[in-house]
Image (cartoon, grey):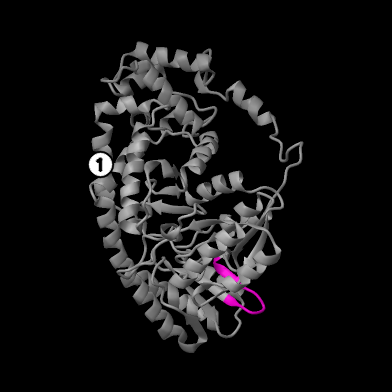
Amino acid sequence: MTQSFTIPYNRLIKLDKTSSTPIYMQIANQLSNAIQRTIIPIDTKLPGSRKLATLLQVNRNTIIAAFDELTTQGWLISLPNQGTFVQQKKSQIQLKSQVFPSVTAYDFPVDNRLDLPNHQHGCTYYFTDGTPDIRLGLQEELAAIFSANLKRKQHSKYFDPYSVKSRLTLAKQVVTYLNVTRNIQVRPTNVLLTQSVSSALSLCTRLLLKAADQVAIDAYSYYGSNIILQQTGAELHRIPFDHDGLDLQALEKLCQHTPIRLLYIRANHQYPTTQSLNIQKRVKLLQLAQRYDFIVIEDDSTFDFHYNNHPPLPLLSGDATGRVIYLTTLGKALASDLSTAVILAPENLISELEKYKALIEENKNYYTTHVLTELIEEGILFRHQVKVNKIYKERRDYFCDMLQQLFADHIEFTIPEGDLAVWVTFRTPVNLMRVRAFCLLRDLYIPTTLLYQSKILTGIRLGFAHLTLEEMDHCLPIFHQASLD
């Protein structure tokens, strides 16, 4: 049996005499917690009530009451002429004797495509497909705004789950923000806010697509959006693209013999190449949508990250027929839970999408809604976006300079005018899985979803925004050595 003198009870048990919890219960709770965490092992003999009372500087009757409580709960057992010992609770013994089933008794579909983004790693350094740097977030400002909102008594009236006042206020601010930044003239009734662009796309496809519908996408595109589209039962048609975006001749040829229901596109910052559709092609695309009667879902989730004074306006800004559904994000630069996805569409579609959203997303983000509203209304979000874009532009330039210095003529890339990543293709085929394994051994993680390899293409999308210049100095030489070794 474990001797009680090896356990420092006076340091293990901290009593708060100002608490409303009785002292004996504080002792009982802390002892049971220590037993559960095996700080006090099974079969340990506890000190006598007098000795423990002296150690904790409490009345002996308080210790007796605590021991009685623990004995009742099943943590302790008192043996005549021997003392009080820690015992294993019967409930614990019963639980341990039951073997939890390793598999279900029923079948369910397993989608191996979803395994890709869930790789775990323990590396210090890593590449992403283009994510903001959380260290540039407005931590102090956000803390102050959240604190102020938590203290406002009038917030209690917003906790009614059927109230739309706070959401409508945010929608009005979103409309103003999008008008200023994207020249989109909409009303709050054209706005639906969701947790992410993925959930926004899922809502839209659930409503608009059915099995065997025909959907057009870029030849190379984001695996997550492809899976969301495929899960509707739709058939995907990959459209090639060139240096200035989607090949519209190929799209029109497809439309001539296949009834396309929907086109999913990133007109700004195509994924993974970061290319943007030129103005002439944008006009032609809207004409094709009207001529062949298909819906356009425009994913513009990285619009705010651009590095020139005149970013291309969204397709939605030129849509007068109600064919474009626009998806974007607000607050992504904050790299926090404040990032919110926005769906812009005609009012009748938004009204129907709200019904679907109500089934899967409850409106409980009261404080977040008010904080984001204040960030937009006070101009804080806009100013922060301008600030971080200057930092990301510097990082982009440094990243591209390093790529050019290290790889010279072995690779091709275009300095992106927007987005948070660089699309790199190799002139000579390279085994990208071997490159990934080499980097992993040197504490640099590369997700498999960044790799694009076929008989005609060896490409990789490398995010730069989350890396400081010093971190780039560490990561890129490793990647270079892996690629050319």
Q: Could you say which is closer to the camera, residue 28 or residue 118?
A: 118
The reply to whether residue 409 is visible in this rendering is yes
Check the image and report above or below for 342 versus 37: below
Identify the amino acid type marked 1. Ile
Check the image and report above or below for 2 versus 217: above
Q: Could you say which is closer to the camera, residue 472 or residue 195?
A: 195
Residue 99, horizontal then vertical, whole percent: 70, 33
Magenta-drawn stretch contains 2? no
Q: Could you say which is closer to the camera, residue 85 or residue 467?
A: 467
Question: Which residues make up the magenta segment?
Answer: 450-458
Say which residue label 1 marks. 145
Q: Secondary structure at mark 1?
A: helix
Question: Which residue is located at x 32 percent, y 70 percent?
Answer: 308
Give the image quarter of residue 137: bottom left
Looking at the rendered image, the quarter that the C terminus falls into is: bottom right
Check the image and report above or below for 19 versus 453: above
Question: Which residue is located at x 42 percent, y 27 percent?
Answer: 161
